């Protein structure tokens, strides 16, 4: 036991004197968490509070064009800026290109007349079907000039799709209004009263958005709640650079030769490194969580809400840390040089993070990658954290993620031991 | 009958990539309390032999016994019997001499109180007391060599293997180290030493073996060997028996 204690003290002393290593282990993930959360938080605000900038050119002089503008404005998604109807497409696209706005909508000159014509055709068909006589309309419905939506290529696909969806819903509203007015007039030869129009068109059924959680709490997830767990796991696994280097350094400098001639098994050294660096990973998690809880609000970022089940949080953090440390030792055992550890270690963690769903959500991945998810320990760690942080889960809810993570850890440990035996290091 | 510190019988060894055996039926006896020198040109096999004696390499056939204990069994308790001062500086450069000695002392099987006592003794003897709390990476080459030696002897080993313990140090440090090794030998420690510093070796070793191409070509008391080969010093004997051609091209 004293040998193990001496080894731990030695490892802690060496670690504390590696200032660059400490900065890398603690500073980098904190910066990463702050930067990513800030960016994602502001992206969220772009689509909600700040709104997407939009240029609107209404070349239509009729009522439908004006109504469409009102409907788009009412959606509340866009910061609308109207341009003169004589403005050419070239100038409008030029303004979008120069990021005056990320979107531009051009309402064609015949929009109102085409909408009216279309609605009259539909009403006439409807009345004829009912055996009533409607106006004879010869025009063919559906031939109206299209509304043009220009967008800047930097606009993410998801934003573009929501903008397009919002525009379609506004057009639908205008078309429905027109249809209703024509139908009412054909039946009663009177204009549709405003109150009735309002009751029919604007009386939409409300949609309540409720995040699903295991504990029934309806806490709305935010960028912090998504990012802190993800980048904590990333930081833990990034210990590969420091710990892997430490193992290689010990192999390369003479100290390892000396250790082999001493009456103590090298496995004690590995156990010492595991204990020391496991404490480091736990400390990393504690620091990042503390920053999320107390520092983020000071930076006007959403605060981190810790899960109710702290025991569950401790267990998941412990297993993640142990897996990260095991991986780092395994890389250190097989690497020949520190450059190999730094290169392979860092790149492999980025790859495991990518296929583990830290960078792109697992549900958005192609099917071929979804099977690869299972081999990434970062995936199981992230799922367990999300269960606690986002779904309000408890210890009993994370077992299905913790067990695979445990088995991956044992597999990595066995690989490291086989590597040590093959190299006659133990 | 004198006790054998090291007893090598019919040793056979080759590296995995080698087709020929480096050692085949090698025999060597080193009596307890001796100051024994193992010499040979580069690539002769002396470092390999030292690595085999300290258990850093495993051998295929034969036996190596340290004070009657077979080293091949990989029984770690055998390692308490000897100390090793490798040619490379084998310690943690980020730590101080005290911290290094605390760690290696514990791993050598000493208790906390004993370690503290030995640290004070060794730092005093080797002139490192004033820098006891400075990081070794800031030390001169000579000071690092003394730390390397101190770690090898912290647990009072019965046998001390020294692989070029004075390489790259100044005359004063070399003098101090050799004198200390002699003192250590007087207290009963068997010294098994290898070096290319033949004049230094002459002053330290009473008995030697010259090894070349995996074979012991001469073995005995140094003075007897010099008389028998009518040579004045070890260097002359060395060149006479191993030739003057470069020998490290085949290493």
Image (cartoon, coloured by chain):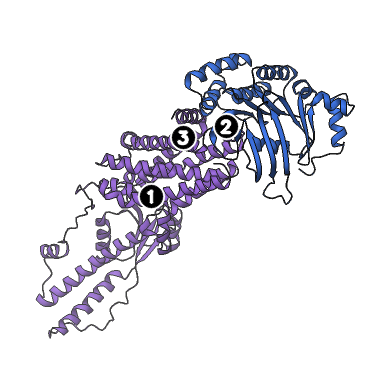
Chain colours: A purple, B blue
Element carrying mark 2? helix
Q: Residues within 10 Å of mark 1 (few under 14, many from 20)?
A: many
Alpha-carbon distance for marks 1 and 2? 38 Å
Secondary structure, mark 1, is: helix
According to the picture, the residue beneath numbered tag 3 turns out to be A272
Q: Foreground residue, A121 or A164?
A: A164
Judging from the image, mark 2 belongs to the subunit labelled B
- The residue to which callout 2 is attached is B79
Q: Is residue A233 above or below residue A199?
A: above
**Farthest front residue?**
B1
Relative image position of residue A103 (x, y in whole percent): 38, 58
Residue hosting label 1:
A405
Residue, x 57% and y 40% (percent of image)?
B73
Q: Mark 3 or mark 1, which is nearer the start of the sequence? A: 3
Label annotation for residue A260? none
- Decide: marks 3, 2 in contact (CB < 8 A)? no
The chain containing the residue under callout 1 comes to A
Extreme residue in the right direction: B230
Which residue sits at x=17%, y=64%? A201
Q: Are marks 1 and 3 on the same chain?
A: yes
Give the side of residue A18 with respect to residue B180, left or right. left
Residue A232 image point, x, y percent: 39, 42
- Whether tag 1 and tag 3 are in contact, CB under 8 A, the answer is no
Please tell me whether mark 3 sits on a helix, a strand or a loop.
helix
Left or right: B44 with respect to A46?
right
Residue A147: percent from the left, percent from the top?
34, 67
Mark 1 or 3, closer to the camera: 3
The reply to whether residue A180 is visible in this rendering is yes
Q: Quadrant of residue B250?
A: top right
The subunit carrying tag 3 is A
A192 or A403: which is nearer to us? A403
């Amino acid at each position: 036991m004293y040998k193990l204690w001496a080894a731990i003290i030695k490892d802690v002393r060496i670690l504390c004197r590696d200032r660059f290593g400490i900065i890398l282990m603690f500073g980098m993930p904190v910066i990463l968490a702050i930067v990513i959360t800030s960016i994602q938080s502001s992206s969220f605000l772009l689509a909600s509070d700040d709104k997407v900038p939009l240029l609107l050119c209404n070349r239509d002089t009729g009522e439908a064009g004006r109504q469409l503008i009102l409907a788009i404005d009412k959606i509340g998604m866009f910061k609308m800026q109207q341009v003169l109807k004589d403005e050419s497409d070239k100038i409008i696209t030029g303004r979008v290109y120069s990021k005056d706005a990320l979107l531009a909508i051009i309402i064609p000159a015949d929009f109102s007349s085409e909408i009216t014509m279309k609605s009259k055709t539909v009403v006439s068909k409807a009345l004829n079907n009912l055996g009533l006589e409607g106006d004879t309309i010869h025009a063919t419905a559906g031939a109206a000039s299209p509304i043009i939506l220009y967008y800047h290529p930097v606009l993410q696909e998801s934003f573009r799709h929501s903008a397009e969806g919002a525009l379609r819903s506004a057009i639908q509203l205008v078309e429905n209004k027109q249809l209703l007015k024509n139908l009412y007039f054909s039946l009663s030869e009177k204009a549709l009263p405003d109150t009735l129009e309002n009751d029919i068109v604007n009386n939409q059924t409300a949609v309540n958005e409720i995040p699903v959680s295991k504990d029934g709490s309806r806490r709305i997830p935010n960028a912090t709640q998504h990012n802190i767990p993800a980048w904590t796991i990333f930081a833990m696994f990034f210990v590969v650079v420091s710990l892997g280097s430490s193992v290689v350094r010990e192999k390369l400098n003479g100290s390892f030769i000396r250790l082999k001639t001493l009456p103590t098994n090298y496995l004690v050294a590995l156990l010492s490194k595991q204990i020391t660096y496991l404490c480091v990973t736990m400390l990393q998690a504690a620091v990042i969580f503390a920053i999320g809880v107390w520092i983020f609000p000071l930076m006007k970022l959403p605060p981190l809400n810790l899960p109710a089940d702290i025991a569950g949080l401790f267990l998941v953090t412990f297993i993640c840390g142990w897996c990260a440390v095991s991986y780092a030792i395994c890389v250190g055992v097989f690497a020949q040089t520190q450059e190999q550890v730094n290169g392979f270690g860092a790149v492999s963690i980025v790859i495991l993070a990518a296929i583990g769903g830290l960078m792109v959500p697992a549900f958005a991945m192609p099917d071929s990658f979804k099977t690869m998810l299972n081999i990434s320990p970062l995936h199981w760690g992230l799922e367990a954290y999300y269960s606690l942080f986002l779904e309000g889960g408890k210890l009993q809810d994370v077992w299905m993620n913790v067990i695979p993570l445990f088995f991956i850890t044992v597999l990595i440990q066995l690989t490291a031991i086989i590597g040590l035996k093959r190299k006659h290091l133990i | 009958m004198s006790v054998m510190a090291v007893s090598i019988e019919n040793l056979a060894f080759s590296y995995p990539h080698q087709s020929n055996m480096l050692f085949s039926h090698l025999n060597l006896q080193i009596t307890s309390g001796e100051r024994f020198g193992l010499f040979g040109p580069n690539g002769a096999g002396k470092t390999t032999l030292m690595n085999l004696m300290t258990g850093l390499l495993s051998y295929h056939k034969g036996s190596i016994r340290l004070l009657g204990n077979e080293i091949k069994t990989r029984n770690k308790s055998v390692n308490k019997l000897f100390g090793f001062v490798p040619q490379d500086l084998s310690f943690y450069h980020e730590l101080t001499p005290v911290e290094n000695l605390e760690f290696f002392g514990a791993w050598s099987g000493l208790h906390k109180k004993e370690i503290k006592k030995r640290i004070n003794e060794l730092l005093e003897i080797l002139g490192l007391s004033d820098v006891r709390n400075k990081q070794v990476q800031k030390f001169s080459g000579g000071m690092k060599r003394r730390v390397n030696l101190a770690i090898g002897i912290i647990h009072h080993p019965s046998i001390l293997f020294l692989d070029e313990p004075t390489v790259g140090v100044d005359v004063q440090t070399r003098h101090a180290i050799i004198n200390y090794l002699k003192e250590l030998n007087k207290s009963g420690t068997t010294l098994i030493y290898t070096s290319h510093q033949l004049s230094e070796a002459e002053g330290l070793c009473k008995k030697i073996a010259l090894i070349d191409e995996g074979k012991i070509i001469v073995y005995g008391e140094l003075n007897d060997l010099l008389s028998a080969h009518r040579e004045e010093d070890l260097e002359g004997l060395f060149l006479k028996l191993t030739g003057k051609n470069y020998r490290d091209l085949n290493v």
